[in-house]
Amino acid sequence: MIYSLARPLFFMLDAERAHHLALKLLDDLHGFGMKFGSIPANPVKAMGLEFPNPVGLAAGLDKDGAHIDALASLGFGFIEIGTVTPRPQPGNPKPRLFRLPESSAIINRMGFNNLGVDNLVENVKKSKYRGILGINIGKNFDTPIESAKGDYLSCLEKVYPYASYVAINISSPNTKNLRQLQQQDALSDLLHSLKAKQNDLASRFGRHVPLAVKISPDLSIDEIREIAALLLEHEIEAVIATNTTLSRDGVPGKYVNEAGGLSGAPLKEASNRVIRHLAEKLDGRIPIIGVGGIMNARDADEKLAAGATLIQIYSGLIYRGPALVGEINQLLLRGKTNENRHSQGNQGP
């Protein structure tokens, strides 16, 4: 209710300014003890972790982990912060964030703007949140692609003690050449090094922190299958499908020709296509986190039907507000209840 009143005001502002203002307001409301409604328990097991519900916050909203406690108050089953890089960087020149209300979409070319991994770690240490926290890592814009592995390994080492899982972002379209890391030889080399580092850190800290790889929606079927095979070969614990798209097919809007990655409703089918192909190849051996175009509860249900175990939202939160978290969980719970009733009804005497 509150968000439906506030949204027109936010949408009158520049998108990036509104983004920061909304997070500050959320922090203030959380500080005053405001409750955003109770989310029913709907536990899901994946990556060796138990999620209180399957609805997560996608990376990108809280790049520096500065708003974890306030975001957790919205009822997410898990929160992913980042993308963070080894060194602070300003990101791409402004303006770099654009709304397309006609399409319920967003275009961003933020460029991994963040205050660096050390700052993020300090924010996580200050947080009171004890739920499932994913930390999304990437490379600095000025690190040559052939040296990118060092950036990922550096970030992994620093965030490992504080993460429930670590997401490897190799699919943002807003860092030059980053998507080259999805190519077979480069990805195999990166995953091999990350697993070796993970095993070393697990021995050092006495806990195993799963790795999830975030991939693009713009991959061919053959590329999706190659990536799936490599995830299995290197025993990666999850895959996040998908990041934003470079496609603008059939998308209206004033800013549609702006450079950057497109998210929101137009991304749904491309994301679902990737999830279906991954699910076919992975055959349940690695969980899929479905993200892209979830604007209502039925969109989330479609992701699960395509083969996802968990889902994440971002653009849907911007357009629909915090109520979307509860709406999705209520529908999924009703579906689970109906399935149980149907199953019990067919058990026979």
Image (spheres, rainbow, N blue to C red):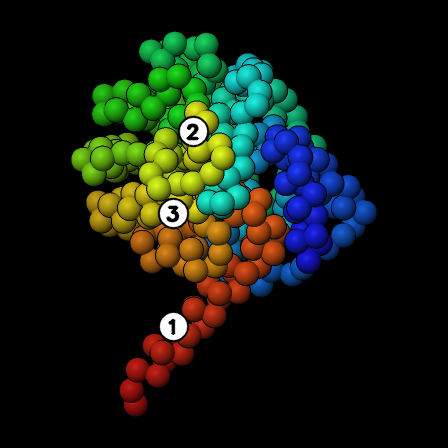
Foreground disc of the pair 2, 1: 2
Name the quarter where the C terminus is drawn: bottom left
Say if 281 sits above or below 187 in the image: below
Of the two numbered discs 2 and 3 on the same chain, state the one appearing first in sequence. 2
Dot 3 crowding, Cα within 10 Å, few <14, some 14–19, many 20+ = many
Three-letter code, disc 2: Asn
Q: Looking at the image, which residue is at 58% across and 63% down?
A: 40
Task: Please identify the quarter of the rendering in which residue 248 is found.
Answer: top left
Where does label 1 land, which residue? 339
State the image coordinates of residue 319 (x, y, percent, origin top left).
56, 47
Q: Looking at the image, which residue is at 61% across and 20% down?
A: 115
State the image coordinates of residue 36 (x, y, percent, origin top left).
69, 55
Say if 70 sits above or below 87 in the image: below
Where does label 3 land, which residue? 268
Asked whether 261 or 44 is in front, the reply is 261
Please give the label number shown on residue 257.
2
